[in-house]
Amino acid sequence: MVAGLVAVTRRDLLLAWKRPGDVLNPLFFFAMVCTLFPLAVGPSPEQLTFSGPGVLWVAALLAALLSLNSLFLGDHEDGSLDQLLVSAQPLPMLVLGKTLAHWLTSGLPLVLISPVLALTYRMPGNVMGVLMLTLLLGTICLSLLGSIGAALTVGLNRGTALLGLLILPLAMPVLLLGANTVSLAAGNEMYTTGVWALAAYAVAAISLAPYATAAALRISNE
Amino acid sequence: MDAMAMGNYGMYVWSCFGITLAVILISDVRARLRHKQVYREIEVRIKALEERK
Amino acid sequence: MWKWFHKLASPPHFYRLAATLIPWLAVPGLMLIAYGAYAGLFVAPEDYQQGDAFRIIYVHVPSAYLSMMAYMFMAFGGAIGLIWRMKLAHAVGAAAAPIGAAFTFLALVTGSIWGRPMWGTWWEWGDPRLTSELILLFLYFGYMALRSSIDDTAKADKASAVLALVGVVNVVIVHYSVEWWSSLHQGQTLFKEGGPAMDASMLYPLLAMILGFTLVFGALLARRIRTEVLYRERRTRWVREMILSPEGGK
């Protein structure tokens, strides 16, 4: 069972290695959205410290959304998705493998560059740690939620707008928990509730979302 | 008149009740129109098929 | 029991049953609403804190309640449709979505108008109920957008059922997370559950409104399900016979 997961993940990681643009573009997007806000609202340090957690989280959410469209699209176009569907391996495991690869190439890089952008928002080191932790848990949730949306819309050629309409309402609690936890940490308040809630969300998403995604893939490819 | 004024909240209270009535009515009209439209499309198709026979 | 269930679920039977059902739901529903509106507006005493503005509760609470109820219809319809492959259940889900969106919209608008004299603003992000309703409205939009972008009805049914089920889990999470969030920012609610007990003269109109709204919702739902059934069965013999019959099947 795990062999199928590992094989799918390896294959997708190799594919991503050959096309680094797919990995880098959402990162550039993330960085640029984070640049937009100080340009729009002004460089005052109080404002930046105050809005930093929220802005970084919204930017990360949008960047994650941007990368979702391609999750099943390539496989759908070259026919390898049909192969996955008829495989003897359980489909939810294969889907989990694909989502894992997607997270490693889109979510994890976001987490890793977030401190650099957080620095420009004058975020102190300990808050940065909380930001990275919430983004780590949050992007896992977003990748898994996104995989459901991507599976429902694969082959519809409606682009990212429909996907956003489906995914953003589902992603709102993740954003709410993540951004507010960082804000609490920035205000030196108790923030562990949010971290635990996000962790619980991530665990629930890992165990449930692949089934929904697998069902959605079967429906989309009937 | 006092009962209508609702102690200066009249505008808020009455607009809420008015909008609610309007939305329910619009929902009903839309449902009726949609049914009529679907019915007519099917009717046209079936009658056309019938005449071809 | 099963025989009865199968008969109910058979499209031609349901199509006819729903037509006879609609007036039996709509007329008592409208009567209850008429009573509730009259008693709520003129008979019930004013609230000791909110004055007459509290009367908005008589349209706000039933709308908010139905916005949830319609979502449950959508999700359960989808689940039954997926598990037992029952087409009628999918039709229920498809029919519930636009009605649910309308009631969600109503709950938002009446809540916002209520908030204006109470908070001095048309929109208060700190109110957990309004914020949850807004996210619910977005869920309805997503559901309807997904449905309308898939041409094949059978596929649209199943895909939107999966989305509705994922959305149910989300509604619960939204509720708790928004509650937590507003507690961080000293959120203020329009009315509190478990507050001072409502006087009977305030409560009965509210109960009448809730029941009346539910019955009217049932009538609207029955009408929309009929349309869905008719459309889905457009190539079947019973529809053909019904339309060609002298009395028709409007």
Image: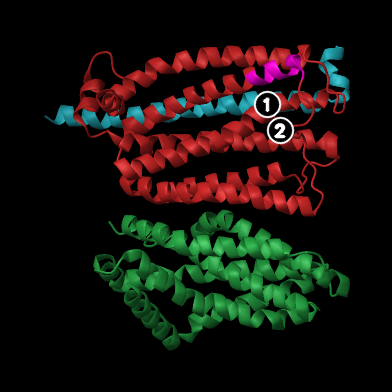
Chain colours: A green, B cyan, C red
* Residue located beneath label 2 in the image: C110
Predominant SS along the magenta part: helix
Q: Which segment is the magenta one? A: C199-207
Residue C228 shown in magenta: no
**Can see residue A44?**
no
Q: Position of residue C9 (x, y in %)?
A: 30, 29
Q: Is residue A51 above or below residue C170?
A: below
**Kind of residue indicated by mark 1:** Val
Please name the residue shown 79% across and 28% down the image.
Answer: B12
Label 1 vs 2, first from the N-terminus:
1
**Kind of residue indicated by mark 2:** Thr
Which mark, residue C59? Answer: 1
- Please indicate whether residue C54 sits to the left or right of residue C95 in the image: right
C-alpha gap between disc 1 and disc 2:
7 Å
Q: Residues within 10 Å of mark 1 (few under 14, many from 20)?
A: many
Give C189 or A76, whichever is nearer the viewer: C189
Residue C202 shown in magenta: yes
Judging from the image, mark 2 belongs to the subunit labelled C
Q: Residues within 10 Å of mark 2 (few under 14, many from 20)?
A: many
Q: Is residue B32 above or below residue A176?
A: above
Q: Position of residue C28 (x, y in %)?
A: 53, 12
Give A78 or A175, whichever is nearer the viewer: A175
Q: Position of residue C159 (x, y in %)?
A: 39, 51
Which image quarter: residue C32?
A: top right
Please identify the quadrant where the C terminus of chain C is shown.
top left
- Please indicate whether residue A127 sits to the left or right of residue C223 in the image: right
